[in-house]
Image (cartoon, rainbow, N blue to C red):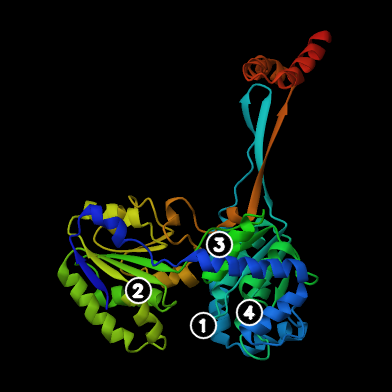
Amino acid sequence: MIKVYNQPEQNSWASLLARPSFDARELLPKVQAIIDEVRVKGDTALFEFTKQFDKVNLKTIALDENIKANAEALLSSPLKAAIQLAKGNIEKFHQAQLQKMDRIETMPGVWCWRKSVGIETVGIYIPGGTAPLFSTVLMLGIPAKIAGCKNIILCTPPNNDKGEIHPAIIYAAALVGVTHIYTIGGVQAIAAMAYGTETVPKVNKIFGPGNQYVTAAKQLVQQNGVAIDMPAGPSEVCVWADDSAIPAFVAADLLSQAEHGVDSQVLLVASNESVVANVQVELELQLAQLSRKELAAKALENSKAIILNNTSEALLLVNQYAPEHLILSIENAEMVAEKVTNAGSVFIGNFSPESVGDYASGTNHTLPTNGYAHAYSGVSVDSFVKKITFQQLTERGLINIGQAVMEMANAESLDAHGNAVAVRLNDIKSKM
């Protein structure tokens, strides 16, 4: 089960908190070769790679309109109701992120303001693999629509030899206003959205999770001018638990993250040995009941429990780890949460499981992993907009500010900059 470290010295934390890593030296050339092939051969390369990697002979890349129309009928009423509930909460939370445009008079006659403009065409990648992540369609499609993106392109790999995709993905895409769906996955999907093919339009920014190949592809196309949401890696959770925690809840939270895949990481920060022992018992009991227990068990082998009985030290360690998901199952959790400075999303108290954020509370589940929460935020409406600044000066405003601008331009030896102000000031004075 989870490896236990009792009161480790701070100088050992960096190695303890290191994520599982892989050697990208062999990976990157392979990924770049696929990207280059798609850039040169377009749709032909997409068909070839889908046959090679997904074992599917596609007849078309764009999802058939009849399949779109029939998707809703294939879902149960309770599932559709759940998706609609989640959609409502996610919309409510993200709608509140829109900011009013204020005109600021920085000095008399000098007006400045900022306007948010939706990125015109965005691409969202939805992994296939071992789970159809239709929830991610909601998490990316909803803020894109709220932001005002005109074209929302969705790529997801076919899940069987018929080249189909899960109807819940199609249903969620229709609900949130996705404009085009393409049945392609992996590196080839990222390349298609980054550079465009005969069928797939070029996008301005790419969003969505994926395996190490997809992550590498996103980072490579970013180097060629295509924006991405953030660097991302395997999913992770940190649960901080003390004697007030309920061991069954803590174990359930750890397992809900571990079942994502063998490269997922879970970290338990505990106040004493008995907390860890009780959680370990629950882990064994609950693991045996899971349909994905083999995956979860392997993920647990890479995971750790760190015992720190000093609250200040535990907080320091959590902030150093900068987890994608942080669950506070401790006394005074709300007060401690105010002191968290590095985390993708925080879940406060015993009755706030990470899975509610994954699906339906309203917050976004597309979050920075691998320590990137030190510098990155999770996806929000802001991720789908660009912000343009404006300024407008009256004659009086230019008189008020002009001398300072000319002085600074002169100091930087940029005469033309100063002259652009001077010719206007001379014109104003000639009319006075």
Report the disc number at residue 130: 1
Task: Estimate the spatial distance between the alpha carbons at disc 4 and disc 1, rounded to whole Å.
Answer: 11 Å
Residue at 42% in and 62% down? 324
Query: Residue 248 at x, y = what percent?
Result: 27, 78
Using residue 57 as the reference point, say whether residue 104 is left or right of it.
left
Q: Amino acid at mark 2?
A: Asp
Residue at 81% in and 70% down? 198
Q: Amino acid at mark 3?
A: Lys
Mark 4 / mark 1, whichever is N-terminal: 1
Task: Estimate the spatial distance between the alpha carbons at disc 2 and disc 1, rounded to whole Å.
Answer: 20 Å
Using residue 146 as the reference point, say whether residue 342 is left or right of it.
left
Residue at 65% in and 21% down? 108
Mark 2 / mark 4, whichever is N-terminal: 4
Q: Decide which of 405, 431 is in the foreground and name it.
A: 405
Q: Residues within 10 Å of mark 2 (few under 14, many from 20)?
A: many
Q: Are marks 2 and 4 in contact (CB under 8 Å)?
A: no
145 lies above or below 299: above
Report the disc number at residue 253: 2
Task: Estimate the spatial distance between the alpha carbons at disc 1 and disc 3, rounded to whole Å.
Answer: 30 Å
Q: Which residue is mark 4?
A: 157
Query: In the rendered image, is residue 72 in sight?
Result: yes
Mark 2 / mark 1, whichever is N-terminal: 1
241 lies above or below 341: below
Task: Estimate the spatial distance between the alpha carbons at disc 3 and disc 4, rounded to whole Å.
Answer: 30 Å
Q: Which residue is mark 3?
A: 92
Query: Residue 87 at x, y = what percent?
Result: 57, 70
